[in-house]
Image (cartoon, grey):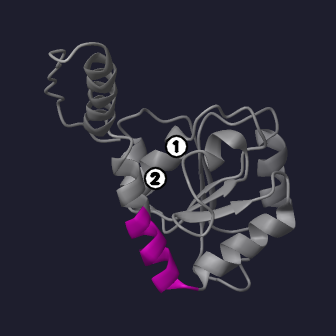
Amino acid sequence: MKNEFPDSRLIVVGPGTRFRGKYQKQVRDYGLKDVHFIGPVSDGELPSYYSTADIFCAPATGQESFGIVLLEAMALGKPVIASNIEGYAGVMTDGKEGLLVPPKSADGLAKALRTLMADEELRRQMGERGILTAKNYSWQHVAKKVVAYYNKVLDESSPKGILECEAEPATI
């Protein structure tokens, strides 16, 4: 990828796994430049990392119950490349906010990265759609849906059962 996109860089943020040392050794052994392992960061620092990215990539191999990290990146207008696992596919649509790839598929991941790295307009469009998707998961939006559901249930059992809720705006 570096040969095709010489100005690219990879920033790995998070606590890492038991394989982190192996990956860092591979980076050194191959003489790769512009690969940075940041390690764990606070929740307050995450938006600055999302903001500096052109693409957010989450190649998880499983065990993700919900794609909150995808929503965080989408809320900041970043196109997403993620593994096509249940927790991630539940919050994004392949080809809409980003690209879903088969888990553990290096070729699928490389193809998706090439596609988005080569097409700035596609990244922009997916980022804009991601912002809209992320808004559907804001606390304000979710609270309104819950209240609407309660009102529906109350309306079915009692003609005068109405709830009102003022939800505080929140960002993801």
Q: Secondary structure at mark 1?
A: helix
Look at the picture and state if 96 lies above or below 3: above
Q: Is residue 140 visible?
A: yes
Magenta segment boundaries in residue numbering: 119-129
Residue at (43, 60) in percent of width and height:
130
| x and y, in percent, of residue 48 in the image | 37, 51
Residue at (36, 58) in percent of width and height:
132
Image position of 66 (left or right of 64): left
Q: Secondary structure at mark 2?
A: helix
Look at the picture and state if 108 lies above or below 103: below
Look at the picture and state if 119 lies above or below 123: below
**Disc 1 residue type?**
Val
| x and y, in percent, of residue 165 in the image | 16, 24
| x and y, in percent, of residue 134 in the image | 39, 50
Q: Quadrant of the C terminus?
A: top left
Residue located beneath label 1 in the image:
69
Q: Quadrant of residue 156?
A: top left
Q: Are marks 1 and 2 in contact (CB under 8 Å)?
A: yes
Image position of 122 (left or right of 36): left
Label 1, label 2: how far apart the Cα atoms are: 6 Å
Magenta span: predominant SS is helix
Q: Quadrant of the N terminus?
A: bottom right
| x and y, in percent, of residue 31 in the image | 79, 67
**Disc 2 residue type?**
Ala
Residue 44 drawn in magenta: no
